[in-house]
């Protein structure tokens, strides 16, 4: 801002102090503006998540990790329209669990949802089930298929029981080992 003032102000300690203080205030104001703007988008919202949840009719649960809360909101936003396999896939994939395949078993009135790119049961499976139950017609059953690490796939990667023991994997880490 000093460049816009007459040259004789460049020597003044008072003006320099004033410009420094104003610059600090403008920087803080700019950061606050960007923070408020971030609340208007699901992927960047933090303290505004409760507003998104209220808009979508989701109970506010601040104990859940923020990414899980975002996933629930995304699924609500995507779960509008005629229920098709593509819509079910879109909603299921909104939970950050990778790719999902949806198979309709019309003869048995069942929808099969397989998590194909992630191993184990997703952390927020209850949220996924709730979101899908809300959009899938009540007369259809839903079955979930999960992929797990097998000994055959460990052998291919050269892992042995001793390697895994030495690495001190917890069971939850081992389940999702890729």
Image: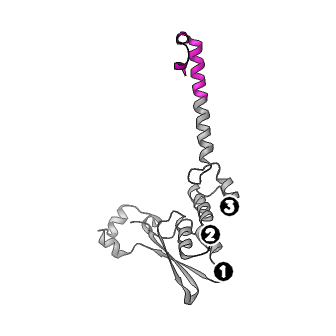
Label 2 SS: helix
Q: Quarter of the image holding residue 90?
A: bottom right
Main SS of the magenta segment?
Answer: helix
How far apart in space, not on screen, are marks 2 and 3 (Cα)? 12 Å
Query: In the picture provided, is 19 more to the left or to the right than 152?
Result: right
Q: Quadrant of the N terminus?
A: top right
Residue 93 location (% of width, % of height): 52, 67
Instruction: Of the two numbered discs 2 and 3 on the same chain, state the one appearing first in sequence.
Output: 3
* Range drawn in magenta: 1-25
Label 1 SS: loop
Q: Mark 1 — residue?
A: 138
Q: Label 1 neighbourhood size at 10 Å, few (<14), some (14-19), many (20+)?
A: few
Label disc, if present, on residue 115 of the rendered structure: none
Could one spot residue 60 in this view of the protein?
no
Residue 134 location (% of width, % of height): 65, 72
Q: Mark 2 — residue?
A: 131
Is residue 21 a member of the stretch shown in magenta? yes
Residue 111 location (% of width, % of height): 55, 80
């Amino acid at each position: 801002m000093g460049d816009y003032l007459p040259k004789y102000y460049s020597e003044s300690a008072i003006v320099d102090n004033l410009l420094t203080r104003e610059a600090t205030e403008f920087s803080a104001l700019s950061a606050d503006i960007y923070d408020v703007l971030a609340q208007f988008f699901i992927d960047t919202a933090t303290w505004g998540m409760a507003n998104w949840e209220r808009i979508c009719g989701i109970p506010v649960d601040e104990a859940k990790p923020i990414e899980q809360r975002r996933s629930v909101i995304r699924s609500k936003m995507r779960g509008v329209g005629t229920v098709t396999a593509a819509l079910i896939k879109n909603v299921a994939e909104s939970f950050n669990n990778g790719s999902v395949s949806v198979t309709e078993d019309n003869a048995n009135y069942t929808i099969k949802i397989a998590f194909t790119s992630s191993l184990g049961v997703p952390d927020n499976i209850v949220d996924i089930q709730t979101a899908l139950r809300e959009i899938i017609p009540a007369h259809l059953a839903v079955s979930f298929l999960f992929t797990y690490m097998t000994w055959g796939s460990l052998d291919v990667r050269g892992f042995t029981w001793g390697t895994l023991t030495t690495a001190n994997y917890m069971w939850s880490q081992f389940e999702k080992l890729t």
